[in-house]
Amino acid sequence: MESKAASDIFAVLGHEGRLSVFRLLMRHAPQGVRAGEIAEVLGLKPNTASVYLGALEQAGLIAARRDGRAIFYSIDLPRTAGLVDYFLTDCCRGRPDLCAPATLATFPPVQRTLNMSKRVFNVLFICSGNSARSIFAEAILHKEGAGKFVAFSAGTKPRSDLNPYALEVLKRSGHDVSSLRAKNVDEFRQPGAPKFDFVFTVCDTAAHEDCQPWPGQPMTAHWGMPDPVKATGTDAEKALAFARTYAELERRIRAFVALPFEALQRVALQDRLDDLGHEVEA
């Protein structure tokens, strides 16, 4: 990337509002986000969001596509990669250790495969309330990944309780629910908290939130799915929504546990983790 092009992009990203839109879309990359959803999540007026999106699109950082009546915006990954490459090859003289020594000390570039010398991996599942989806995921991985994974879950809301429909599904599926409780993510940011190898968000609200990076630079992926707590109808219809959510998470987690971690490089492993979040049951 030429210096002039990089300078133009920096000028666009130098605005706090445009930067917030870019960061939101990066958290969803390579998937797109609806224009209305971007405005809602960031608390922007629709016309303000439209101006920010237009500036980012003109800079070549994002692209728009129409799906029916909705317009989805997504990151232009090659263009963004070019900006990163500009930093590394020009500003950092091809030596990333000059620009980010602290980050690289935690996640050295030579580490291309997951460190399998650590036989047990800590996994955190995050959703908004920690009342159903993330609790399902914690319980399922505790069962399916016993001996290889230690599962945790948390919510982004200040306080929540376990949903009774979720507890019923877990009991019916043979899980011991006596030790399960709703937790806030702040609990895992305290000194002495577990260091996570994997962090997954399992609902849209958690993916939108601007969470601080987790210590140790864990591998992350978004496995979003509808919130069964919001299901309406009869008790039987609500119970069915929870059962379907449990079944989908069970399918994804079984696939996750079965991944050949020893053989996959980090980039390939990240692709597989992302794919699990995009796949739908046939």
Image (tube, rainbow, N blue to C red):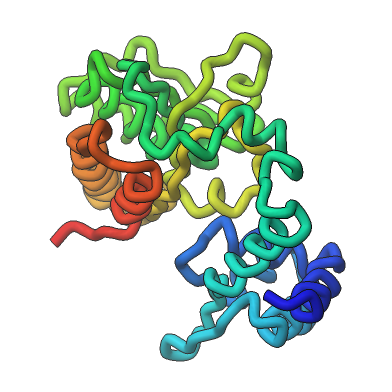
Q: Position of residue 250 (x, y in %)?
A: 22, 38
Q: Position of residue 206 (x, y in %)?
A: 55, 46
| Residue occupying image coordinates x 24% and y 60% | 280
Residue 210 % position (x, y): 67, 47
Specify whether 170 is left or right of 118.
Answer: left
Q: Residue at x 41, y 35 (%)?
A: 134
Asked whether 222 or 106 is in front, the reply is: 106
Task: Using the rendered view, name the quadrant where residue 282 is placed.
Answer: bottom left
Horizontal relation, residue 42 to residue 29: left or right: right
Q: Is residue 49 above or below residue 258?
A: below
What residue lies at 28% left-to-right and 49% top-to-bottom? 241
Q: Residue at x 55, y 84 (%)?
A: 64
**For residue 177, above or below residue 80:** above
Question: Who is closer to the viewer here, 116 or 93?
Answer: 93
- Residue 154 makes an appearance in the image: yes
The number of callouts visible is 0
252 or 96, which is in the foreground? 96
